[in-house]
Image: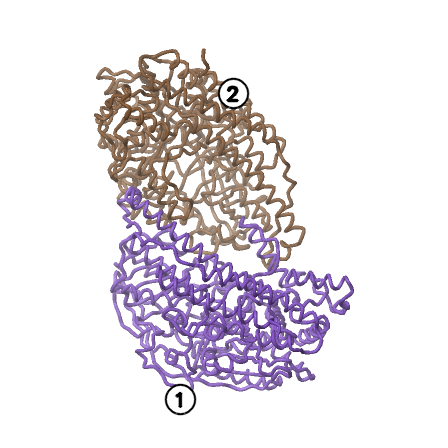
Chain colours: A brown, B purple
Amino acid sequence: MLAALKRHRGALLMGLIAPLALAVAAVPGTPGVADLQGFSARTAALQQRLEQRFDAALSAADLRAWMQQLSAAPNHVGSAHDKANAEFILQKFREWGWDASIEQFSVLYPTPREEIVELVAPGRFIATLREPPVDGDATSAQVADELPPYNVYGADGDVTAELVYVNQGMPDDYKELDALGVSVKGRIVLARYGGGWRGLKPKLAYEHGAIGCLIYSDPRDDGYGAGDTYPRGGYRPPDGVQRGSVQDLTLYSGDPLTPGIGSTAGAKRLALQDAITILKIPVLPISYADAGPLLAALGGRVAPPAWRGGLPLAYHLGPGPARVHLKVQSDWQQKPIYDVIAKIRGSEEPDRWIVRGNHHDAWVFGAADPFSGHVALMAEAKAIGKLAKEGWRPRRTLVYASWDGEEPGLLGSTEWVEAHAAELQAKAALYINSDMNSRGTLDVQGSHSLQQFVNQAARDVQDPETAGSVRTRAVAVRRVAAYEAGRAFDTGGDVPLGALGSGSDFTPFLQHLGVSSLNVEFHGEAEYGVYHSAYDSFDHFRRFVDPTFQYGVALAQVVGRIVLRAAQADLLPTAQGDFADSVAAYDDEVHKLIDGMREKSRELDTLLDDGSYRFAEDPRQPRAAPARADEVPNLDFAPLDAAVARLKTSAAGFDAAYARVAMAGGPANAARLRLNAALGGLEQALTDPRGLPGREWYRHMLYAPGLHTGYGVKTLPGIREALEERRWSEANRYIGVVAHSLNAYSERLDRAIATP
Amino acid sequence: MLAALKRHRGALLMGLIAPLALAVAAVPGTPGVADLQGFSARTAALQQRLEQRFDAALSAADLRAWMQQLSAAPNHVGSAHDKANAEFILQKFREWGWDASIEQFSVLYPTPREEIVELVAPGRFIATLREPPVDGDATSAQVADELPPYNVYGADGDVTAELVYVNQGMPDDYKELDALGVSVKGRIVLARYGGGWRGLKPKLAYEHGAIGCLIYSDPRDDGYGAGDTYPRGGYRPPDGVQRGSVQDLTLYSGDPLTPGIGSTAGAKRLALQDAITILKIPVLPISYADAGPLLAALGGRVAPPAWRGGLPLAYHLGPGPARVHLKVQSDWQQKPIYDVIAKIRGSEEPDRWIVRGNHHDAWVFGAADPFSGHVALMAEAKAIGKLAKEGWRPRRTLVYASWDGEEPGLLGSTEWVEAHAAELQAKAALYINSDMNSRGTLDVQGSHSLQQFVNQAARDVQDPETAGSVRTRAVAVRRVAAYEAGRAFDTGGDVPLGALGSGSDFTPFLQHLGVSSLNVEFHGEAEYGVYHSAYDSFDHFRRFVDPTFQYGVALAQVVGRIVLRAAQADLLPTAQGDFADSVAAYDDEVHKLIDGMREKSRELDTLLDDGSYRFAEDPRQPRAAPARADEVPNLDFAPLDAAVARLKTSAAGFDAAYARVAMAGGPANAARLRLNAALGGLEQALTDPRGLPGREWYRHMLYAPGLHTGYGVKTLPGIREALEERRWSEANRYIGVVAHSLNAYSERLDRAIATP
């Protein structure tokens, strides 16, 4: 953005551009000139007036009222209130002038019929598995329609066995248990939340031979170790439980029975036992009030220092003497889900879609998750509807979606994307997601070619708490944090976009179809320790998350600008140089990864050869030395490096041509049409129909949720995960696949600017 | 050592040295050749036979029996059992053939008459301030002769005020409290142990306006957060209290009333109010059982994340609503202390002393602190006495000292050093200290010219738990730790010596007189959370610290070798190159320190100028931006850099000459006499009679306990602390003073090897 801004300013000084934009109210920290990517000075000025009208239609009171209503009763899939909410949202969209309807799918959605967690030796303790009402929280007493805390898509089972504490139950934790001589085979594991996606905990436990899994929220992480507990503060009270899905979404998201296709009434479904995203052992989430007696009953060795939590006891690993009885029996039923889809048809390019979504289902009441983001989406839709009623029409088609079934596994978005895949690949230019939102700092993840575009939107939105823009604040927070941590001092520049992993509804768009996507949120200043519990309520939200709802309004302003600019720009917004830089950085990372692995392997060999591990061991606390690993070969990265170099050249050429065409303004012409046609589905060039190893549903060659991180992203996943798992020939193969995708992408850029 | 070893091996291969040493039993990992610094091949072989006889006289059963007897009753200064122990030790030394006597001093030693800690609002809670008996601990029920837990040399007082939690009560904690708008003025602070020496906590509290101070042991640090608590494990039980001195030993150690002179019966004493090492406010140590209700009663803001401990509550800062009543009244009496001093006169150089010490007073029973080290000293003395009885005589004089009054402030050692200062400066070549010892890894701190010497001793002692030497193990532990932490991989080499700060009896020798000193210990494998409590008992020690007493024997073997080699070597052991390298590293550190400060100041100015701190602030959690600091000037380090360069040259010349003379062997000659004369008091060249700023008692220009770290060392303290406190002209002045000392040192090296 800096380079473009300088060019623009230079043109202004030379009198080439009329200083129209100066009439636009300047946002503090901006030059007062409407520098909008993809717009000419003339269209930018029009756009800014449109955005002023959009802003004027936003109201914090609306957001507050909608949230209170939407979160008034439990909203899990299949609940009466979730369906009523879908109908209310539909009615609102229609009232606001949108062409809206509900699209229904039928999904497998097990709900618990019986749950038991009890310590049977030494002594006896029966876990309550219930979240009692708390003072001053209006909905917490309203438990009639709630499901008990559970992990959806765990297996049924009735097991009794010794307990083992496995820390967060991630791969490194099992390596440490191996070194300490503790096996989970035939046992029940107790894992603490954190360190990676919850669904990996029972999956890895099963892979290591465990027959059951309990997951608890340690008070160090989001209870009294984080701050005052609810209702004194916003953190997790002793009985608070984090529910959540344990579906194996690293393989595919959506209905476990219909991978790759929409789960319409007549869709062909897998047999239950063939659904590989359903786990094989029973699993339940518990509170720290319920986990305390189990941990206290464990013997065996004391857990390593980093594994110890906030309960007032010495954490032991077991196995035993604690023996636990775990029983889960569910109703394995099909349930309907209700996606609300609303459109305003584009006047000039109706077959180019800007898609915007947020889910509406919740684990219980769901004030923060999902309604904090959802009410912003509604505010945008209301304001856009008002513009439309006043005669405005978007150039491109707007599609607003309120997804159902996100919590169990991105069901609503995935099934819709799978049902409309061909149309979306032809038409969807951009998907913008939100989910939870709170007081704090803007954070956007997504396709790196959109970094400048997003920063321009953030530049033009006033922060509710300070005198700067939300961009100014996001930069300041990063710089102060870097300074205080003694890290390399960040001298400013754009707020970088993080890469997208998973955990919300962008996944099917981006990683299955290759539609450029963004996820937008504010966070950092909430007292929020009630994630996925019955205490994520309106009363909690208004006290501890965003009391004035002004950050909900700010989210609507940022996303509204992204939507409206993407819909209206002469040229679809982009800066390919940023994308090329990011890819080059990823390339650099995988080079460093394998070089570092080679170095570490050699160091380890030295320590094993000279007996250092043997000499260093405490015989009273024996710990096996790490296993000797195979040698790290020299892989041929040349195809990838060459593709990255070509991408940089193509991106630079493209950006220069783009700037020329954008600056020219005037009516649509052949160059503009060609650029927009190229940009519309450009990111699909980064997908490969064969997908990632063992999970062909994930087709994007740059971004995927990590097999061993879950929500957390792996960039260049085909290469990076193969390296991490020491599958050298697979890494070699994916160097070729990724290089091929990048070359296809560069080819599209080159063709778009070639003289016809 | 590596270079010298190679030379030695080369000479052996060329047949220049008879392979006599091969007859010596080879310690695993050593070449079987007696490479002993300062010895010729012939004298080295003799020495190794002597050491075999020394080893044969050591017995773990002796150590166990002595510890059980010495720790059978409370051993604080003034207690009957402490005096009886001194007499027992005297009797033993005499029995073993040493010329031993008790040297008595009279010191100010206040003991508590009344102690009260109570929460008076909200609610009421009276702290027990007592350590009850625990099952299976024979001495814990024996409370009759105990003093209650207290901090000696705190002030008397009777105060009631609001409580403030100040984390560890260190300088950075007060900066954070300032930023958060919390003042301790007129209030009582509650500080957690750790982060720096305990005496700084009430001192800094007083300097910030507090009127009382409580110090508690958080269970995260040495209670259940560290492991199972006593008696299930070795960590601090809920009622365990860490006693300790709060005398301001950063100014001087020893009797507060007799700085710089021995506190003999007739010594001139300061008036109590003029004794600047006595604190100005009342202070008491408390257990976490007593601290819990106080912390739970605090309101105000939640403490920053790093300040939160292991109690099951959200840590708040206050001030209030908790109000605390704190009362301490002591008897301010003179008490006798009993140093046991034992000598064996040297046969050839009687006026060159090798001094070895460990204290015998304890806070209560003192099994680990001090008797774990003290019984090793006794074993050495018994074995040396046996050699002497068999007709052997040391070349140089051995002085073994069992100090009294170390716990309140290094009283016994300091008074003895001050009383004998002139004689020690003339005669003491080396002081070797020990204190606590446990299963684990060898760790030695001290004068860097002794690094190779110490490593040779460690190379020749078998580790009790593994197949290697204690040096092999110390190297292995460091390398494995570096590898596992992902730090730069250490490829081997010597175990480096740490620099000495304070906290034990080496301080008066090294930092007041400039006598080269070492502190030797094994640590790392004890379950030890009972420091300075009544639970530091024989039963605790035999279960959780060193059950077989083999690490006590290993300590005696390492220190015995150091003592015997220093006493017998043809040339006093030294390698000046190591010293020069260390000083060069310190020089590099102070350069980096000021450069880093300049960089940080500029970064901070940028963040203050552009409003980043303002934009980043959470208005609901206001936190003041750091204050703008004065500009960091460019100091002239040239005199220091030049002195370091000269030192490197002089050290290299000296080491080459030393190697020639050592290799030559044969009867004493002029070159040997000149080198030994130079080495005897060499380190005194590093002292300056004007001492350090504001604390002239500390005269060593390379090492001092930090004014704001206490026990923790500051190297180049005159320069480093001036820089840290931004006293630029003082830093400039000390650059000159340190350079002068280093040049004087180099001059002595040069003179020692100059052709006469």
Along the line of sight, which residue is nearer the eye, B239 or A137? B239
- Residue lying farthest bottom? B266
Name the quarter where the C terminus of chain B is drawn: bottom right
* SS category of the residue bearing label 2: helix
Q: Is residue B697 left or right of residue B576?
A: left
Along the line of sight, which residue is nearer the eye, B151 or B492? B492
User: Which label number is shown at residue B143?
Assistant: none
- Local packing at callout 2 (Cα closer than 10 Å; few below 14, some 14-19, many 20+) is some
* Residue B55 horizontal/vertical position (percent): 67, 73
Q: Is residue B454 above or below residue B592?
A: below
Q: Amino acid at mark 1?
A: Gly
Q: Is residue A200 left or right of residue B306?
A: right
* Residue B280 horizontal/vertical position (percent): 30, 72
Q: Amino acid at mark 2?
A: Ala
Q: Chain of mark 1?
A: B
Task: Please tell me in which quadrant of the rendered image residue B607 appears.
Answer: top left
Q: Which residue is mark 2?
A: A744
Q: Is residue A740 above or below residue B541?
A: above
Q: Which residue is mark 1?
A: B266
Q: Is residue B244 above or below residue A549?
A: below
Q: Is residue B575 visible?
A: yes
* SS category of the residue bearing label 1: loop
Between the residue at mark 1 and the residue at mark 2, the CA separation in whole angstroms equals 95 Å
Residue drawn at 36 percent across, 26 percent down: A357
Q: Is residue B480 left or right of residue B154?
A: right
Q: Is residue B288 visible?
A: no
Task: Please tell me in which quadrant of the rendered image residue A371 appears.
Answer: top left
* Residue B399 horizontal/vertical position (percent): 56, 80
Q: Is residue B399 above or below residue A430?
A: below
Name the quarter where the N terminus of chain B is drawn: bottom right
> Decide: marks 1, 2 in contact (CB < 8 A)?
no
